[in-house]
Image: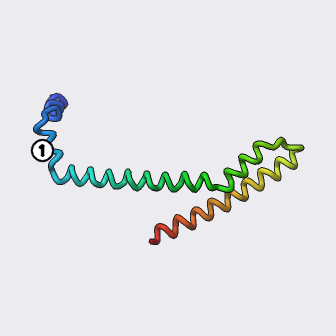
Amino acid sequence: MLARMLLNLLNNLQVVEKLAESRPIRRAAQITAYFITKAQIAGRDTSKRVMRSQTLRQVRDEVGKAPGDLGELGSRLKRVRETFVNEVKEGWKDGSRQIKK
């Protein structure tokens, strides 16, 4: 019964308009829009950083080459891992600097 009454109220155009004009609902919409915008900006920045990533380029190069033996494959993977770790450390430092601002 309660669900039916709630559904009836939410289907009423006047009730929905009143709610939309209320301060708490407007503020919730503003906060939601703010966080969505921030997430989009962060996503764009991250995708740009990934495209410039040395690790990504290195992986692409390594995939194109056929390994001669397991030792060569191990050394390639080690280089990729080292590059990845360095980029993660740099990203961590950049993130800490941005948080401090």
Identity of the amino acid at label 1? Lys
- Viewer-side residue, 16 vs 56: 56
Q: Which coloring applies here?
A: rainbow
> As drawn, is 14 to the left or to the right of 93?
left
Q: Quadrant of residue 13?
A: top left
* Image position of 51 (left or right of 29): right
Seen in the picture, residue 8 relative to 21 is either above or below; the reply is: above
- Residue at image position (73%, 58%) is 82
Residue to which mark 1 is pinned: 18
Residue 88: image location, x then y, percent: 62, 59
Give the residue at x 26% y 52%.
28
Give the answer, above or below, for where 68 lies relative to 54.
above
Q: Give the left or right position of residue 63, taking residue 15 as reference.
A: right
**Residue 52 visible within the image:** yes
* Residue 84, image x, y percentages: 68, 56
Measuring 76% from the left and 43% from the top, which residue is drawn there?
A: 63
In which quadrant is the C terminus drawn?
Answer: bottom left
| Residue at the image position 19 percent from the left and 53 percent from the top | 24
Q: In which quarter of the image is the N terminus?
A: top left
Q: Is residue 25 left or right of residue 60?
A: left
Q: Is residue 2 visible?
A: no
Marks counted in the figure total 1
Considering the numbered disc 1 on the image, is that residue within a helix, a strand or a loop? helix
Disc 1 crowd rating (10 Å Cα; few below 14, some 14-19, many 20+) is few
Q: In which quarter of the image is residue 86?
A: bottom right
x then y, percent, for residue 4: 16, 28
Q: Residue furthest left?
A: 14
